[in-house]
Amino acid sequence: MNTSAFILDQIYAFLAEIGIPVSETTLSQSTFVPGILIDQGRLLVDPAKLLYPGNLLHEAGHIAVTLPAERWSLYEDVTLGRPDKQGDELAVILWTYAACQQIGIPAAVVFHPAGYKGDSEWLLGLFAQETYVGLPLLVWMGMTLDQTVAGGFPQMTSWLRP
């Protein structure tokens, strides 16, 4: 098994464990993130079009930080026409980093050079310094506590926003 397939399997297992549905399919349409479609709170993945396995975790983060009653309404680019979702990005970035730690994959799998508008290296540097942008949002959303444990990110109290 190649490294990308192994990482993708780890991400699939994690998402199944926390309750975010994922289905592999053939996507005929172009999508906001190549190879991934958010559709009614679930992730549809076309492995042939997926450029970076870590993008799946980021897109899952958008589902995770959305209020439970609104998850079903998510489709494609979750921020399009939803200015209220623009602010979720910082929470999603930190949720994604925490997920990498939980799964045991390098954060660089998600924070790859082609992502985050060129700020991937900067974000990885912040995390290495234990500077967690988005932490107040995850605390406010009831997903973690505002206290770091020795040597790392605060423990997530909930992977899905309650």
Image (tube, helix red, strand yellow):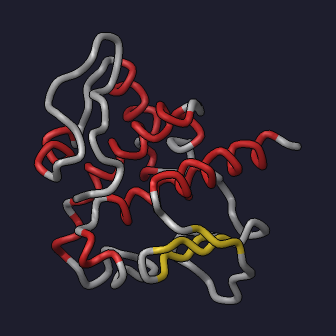
| 29 in relation to 82, above or below | below
Foreground of the two, 74 or 68:
68
The C terminus: image quadrant? bottom left
When the figure is inspected, residue 111 is found, relative to residue 51, above or below; the finding is above
Instruction: Judge from the rendering whether residue 23 lies leftward or rightward of residue 136; answer left or right.
Output: right
- Residue 50: image location, x then y, percent: 69, 64
Q: Give me the residue at 64% from left, 52% from top.
A: 53
Q: Residue at x 36, y 26 (%)?
A: 127
Q: Farthest residue in the top direction?
A: 150
**Which residue is most to the bottom?**
28
Q: Position of residue 108 (x, y in %)?
A: 55, 35
Q: Is residue 130 above or below residue 111?
A: above
Residue 63 x/y as whole percent: 38, 65
Residue 27 placement: quadrant: bottom right
Left or right: 127 with respect to 157?
right
Q: Is residue 131 above or below residue 93?
A: above
* Residue at the right extreme of this rendering: 1
Looking at the figure, which quarter contains the N terminus? top right
Q: Quadrant of residue 40?
A: bottom left
- Which residue is located at x 34 percent, y 19 percent? 152
